[in-house]
Amino acid sequence: MLVQLVRPLVRSQIQMLAQNPAADSQLSSIVSQWLGYLGVQAEVTQLDASGELIEVSLKVSRPEQCNENEWRQILANLAHKHQAPAAEDMGLTYETMTAAQQSKVNRLLACVLQASNEQILDHWEDIKDQLIELNLPDSLLTELRSAIRVATPMELLVRDLEPEVAAYALSKAIAIALMDQHINQAEDGALKILLSALQQKPSSHT
């Protein structure tokens, strides 16, 4: 199921990159998303084209499957570390979206949360702790709870959804659906609707 969702998302992202003359910051953000699907929080600090290859430098935080003692030992084993300058622009983020785009993302992710647990508000504090671990922006976390209270069919929300916003929402939706390491039927349906909307939308770049 994850492969079926991620591969079309990656394909859509590649199409957007090919149509974007200034794709470096966008690719930096996408690489971080790809690693995030594996439970690895990473930040691209340097990205360059070299012949037929793309050279990428990363800052990687402790993966979800790595305990603190293991991580400290790994760090101790790395005698030489290279720290590249942080990337200045990581592409579209929640903070750079318009208020209307943020509102749509809030409601889309609320649909996925409701699909994961119909009684989501009754368990909000526990769920919130898990969402924090996904590194969702504080402002997004604040709005999510309100969005959950006002149910909106996802089929309506994906209408006229910009491709960059759809890609952002889908990447976060997949991470949310995988919080319990399982995608149920309702989550599957919600993700497929969002994925279908992304595939049908041409990029806004020319």
Image (spheres, rainbow, N blue to C red):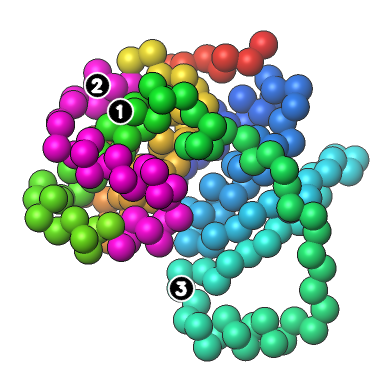
Q: Which mark is residue 155?
A: 2
Q: Residue type at mark 3?
A: Gln
Q: Residue at x 24, y 26 (%)?
A: 154
Q: Please, what secondary structure does the residue beneath circle 3 have? A: loop
Q: Is residue 1 visible?
A: no
Residue at mark 3 to residue at mark 1: CA–CA distance: 30 Å
Q: Amino acid at mark 2?
A: Glu
Q: In the rendered structure, which segment of residues is drawn in magenta? A: 129-158
Q: In this view of the protein, which residue sits in the foreground, 47 or 141?
A: 141
Contact check, label 2 and label 1, Cβ < 8 Å: yes
**Relative to 150, 60 lies left or right:** right
Residue 157 x %, y %: 29, 22
Residue 89's place in the image compared with 20, above or below, is: below
Q: CA distance from mark 2 to mark 1?
A: 7 Å
Q: Which residue is mark 3?
A: 65
Task: Bin the neighbour count of mark 3 within 10 Å (Cα to Cα): few under 14, some 14-19, many 20 and up.
Answer: few
